[in-house]
């Protein structure tokens, strides 16, 4: 039997007059994602149908899970819009797809061709008994609590028959919500914050604070490997990763800040760096993987004191997620095993024995007076290393001699005004 893949849209259908723009974006992402496969498309206003080579079925289904804006999809069997062929194909579908006896089954017809002389319910009543009696296995009809639903989608020139619907990524097409800078660690949370941001249509660049030799070089490799996984969710198959030299700032904070306030001040430095970089890159927000109460730096008091150094919007996609929910997503999208490699980043090394959970900004400012952080931030931004990471990137950190795609020398020129300001403070 001939098979196709039927794709449905979700929240995008609520976009009214802008729906065309969103659907065009999803189509472009889909075509880009499947460009190396032999496929053909049929585009309608609310559906996409894909004709494919059966050997590519699992590859296509896996890639559909990486495309934002797809609500659900099904592998459908094609029939002529005539009762005899629909009944014959429906029997074959049940024989192929259903593996056990005595399954509770419902048959449901959707009639999109309103010129057809019978209603959807009348069609179901006319063909159901013939389908059930012709199937190899025995079924229990249960229209309220079925285990399986045999769907018949009847159109003017064709009919589609299917059992399963798979939930897609949902959300909105990649990039339609603007672009943000995601503070990327090597842990479990920030990659999921990246995934959820992309799900809602945000194009992201990643900003990783590396503190070698205070932290192992393998922690940078973790971030690169996580970026490779996340890159599979973009239309281009690539994400920009910025590696920020944080060692000098890290050492200053460890040496000059009262122990319980080390994490608070360190994160304030990170936010200052991220905001300045985001504004120079004309990015619209900072995104991180914080969730309320998971660690001392993620209490509401701590968040308030930390983000007081910024004016740019801060997005926290995981803010109400518990840890198990985050872990479940990480396992589903394939980042978990990489995230749990035992190599600490700068957020998890030298953690104070008793970090303050209700910090006061007046004390954070007092400890920061001992650090010439403006100069250190300017130097760090001038020495950011920028990498383009794709799912096929073969970059192994045997040393710290990265091949940098583009120089950030322009930042030095752009920030001369800042440097002059620092010198005259």
Image: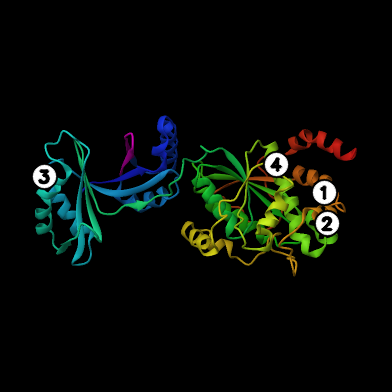
- Label 1 sits on residue: 373
Foreground tag (1 vs 4): 4
Q: Which residues are magenta?
A: 40-51
- Label 2 sits on residue: 252
User: Of callouts 2 and 4, which one flags the residue occurring earlier in the amino acid sequence?
Assistant: 2
Foreground tag (3 vs 4): 4
Name the quadrant containing residue 367: bottom right
The circle on residue 83 is 3
Determine whether label 3 and label 4 are within 8 Å by CB: no
User: Of callouts 3 and 4, which one flags the residue occurring earlier in the amino acid sequence?
Assistant: 3
The answer to if 340 sits in the magenta stretch is no
Determine whether label 2 and label 1 are within 8 Å by CB: yes
Asked which secondary structure carries label 4, the reply is loop
Question: Outermost residue toward the top?
Answer: 17
Whether residue 401 is visible: no
Query: Distance from label 2 to label 4 (Cα)?
Result: 24 Å
Is 248 in front, or is 212? 248
Left or right, 284 with respect to 411, comes to left
Left or right, 153 with respect to 421, comes to left
Up/down of 157 relative to 353, above or below = above
Whether residue 166 is visible: yes
Determine whether label 2 and label 4 are within 8 Å by CB: no
**Category of crowding for the residue at label 1, using alpha-carbon neighbours closer than 10 angstroms: few (below 14), some (14–19), many (at least 20):** some
- Label 4 sits on residue: 311
Asked which secondary structure carries label 2, the reply is helix
Determine whether label 1 and label 3 are within 8 Å by CB: no
The answer to if 42 sits in the magenta stretch is yes
Residue found 48% across the figure and 56% down from its top: 333
User: Of callouts 1 and 4, which one flags the residue occurring earlier in the amino acid sequence?
Assistant: 4
Query: Distance from label 1 to label 3 (Cα)?
Result: 76 Å
Foreground tag (2 vs 4): 4
């Amino acid at each position: 039997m001939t098979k196709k893949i039927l794709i449905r849209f979700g929240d995008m259908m609520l976009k009214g007059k802008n729906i065309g723009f969103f659907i065009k974006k999803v189509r472009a992402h889909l075509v880009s994602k499947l460009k190396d496969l032999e496929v053909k498309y049929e585009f309608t206003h609310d559906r996409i149908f894909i004709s494919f080579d059966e050997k590519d079925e699992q590859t296509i289904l896996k890639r559909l899970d990486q495309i934002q804006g797809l609500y659900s999809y099904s592998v459908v069997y094609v029939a002529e819009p005539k009762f005899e062929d629909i009944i014959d194909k429906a029997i074959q579908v049940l024989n192929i797809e259903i593996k056990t006896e005595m399954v509770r089954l419902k048959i449901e017809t959707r009639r999109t061709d309103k010129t057809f002389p019978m209603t959807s319910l009348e069609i179901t009543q006319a063909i159901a008994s013939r389908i059930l009696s012709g199937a190899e296995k025995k079924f229990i009809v249960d229209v309220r609590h079925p285990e399986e639903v045999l769907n018949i989608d009847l159109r003017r020139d064709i009919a589609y028959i299917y059992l399963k619907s798979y939930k897609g990524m949902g959300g909105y097409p990649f990039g339609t919500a603007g672009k943000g800078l995601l503070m990327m660690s090597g842990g479990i949370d920030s990659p999921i914050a990246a995934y959820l941001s992309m799900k809602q249509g945000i194009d992201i660049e990643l900003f990783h604070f590396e503190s070698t030799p205070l932290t192992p070089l393998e922690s940078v490799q973790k971030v690169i490997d996580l970026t490779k996984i996340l890159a599979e969710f973009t239309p281009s198959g690539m994400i920009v990763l910025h590696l920020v030299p944080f060692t000098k700032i890290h050492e200053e904070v460890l040496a000059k800040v009262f122990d319980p306030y080390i994490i608070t001040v360190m994160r304030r430095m990170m936010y200052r760096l991220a905001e300045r970089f985001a504004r120079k890159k004309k990015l619209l927000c900072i995104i991180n993987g914080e969730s309320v109460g998971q660690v001392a730096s993620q209490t509401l008091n701590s968040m308030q004191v930390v983000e007081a150094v910024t004016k740019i919007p801060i997005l926290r996609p995981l803010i109400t997620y518990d840890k198990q929910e985050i872990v479940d997503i990480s396992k589903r999208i394939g980042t978990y095993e990489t995230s749990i490699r035992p190599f600490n980043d700068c957020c998890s090394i030298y953690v104070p024995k008793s970090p303050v959970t209700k910090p006061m900004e007046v004390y954070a400012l007092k400890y920061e007076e001992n650090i010439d952080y403006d100069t250190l931030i300017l130097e760090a931004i001038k020495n950011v290393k920028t990498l383009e990471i794709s799912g096929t990137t073969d970059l192994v950190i045997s040393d710290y001699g990265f091949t940098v795609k583009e120089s950030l020398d322009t930042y030095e020129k752009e920030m001369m005004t800042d440097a002059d300001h620092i010198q005259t403070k």
